[in-house]
Image: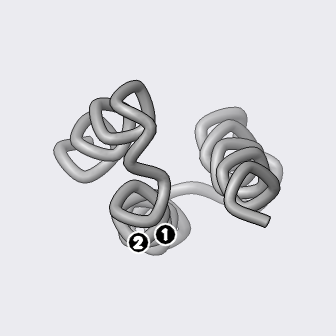
Amino acid sequence: MMFNNLALLYSDQKKYKEAIPLFERSLAILKTKFPNGHPNIDAIQRNIEKLKSKIN
């Protein structure tokens, strides 16, 4: 949760390149705890995709 919260903070500050690795770390942790398709996993995946599109 800590990585996700920090990623959200960076995202709000438009520091997308700093936020993405934190979202990815959070996603990796959640995948060890929850099955694919879990709402939290889906939300983080959407956040990563959204930020990657803002960078490109």
* Rendered residue at 54%/68% (across/down): 31
**Whole-percent x and y of residue 49?**
77, 55
Residue at the (60%, 37%) spot, across then down: 40
Give the left or right position of residue 28, taking residue 39 as reference.
Answer: left
Q: Residue furthest left?
A: 2
Amino acid type, residue under disc 2 in the picture: Pro
Q: CA distance from mark 2 to mark 1?
A: 5 Å
Q: At which x and y percent is residue 25?
A: 37, 71
Q: Is residue 40 above or below residue 32?
A: above
Judging by the rendered image, the residue that carries numbered circle 1 is 24
Identify which residue is drawn at 25% across, 52% down: 3
Q: Which secondary structure, mark 1?
A: helix
Q: Position of residue 4 (x, y in %)?
A: 34, 44
On the image, numbered disc 2 is attached to which residue? Answer: 21
How would you rate the neighbour count of disc 1 (Cα within 10 Å): few for under 14, some for 14-19, many for 20 or more?
some
Q: Nearer the viewer, residue 46 or 31?
A: 46
Which amino acid, mark 1? Answer: Glu
Choose top left, top right, bottom left or bottom right for residue 7: top left
Q: Is 37 situated above or below 31?
A: above
Residue beneath the point at 38% across and 48% down:
15
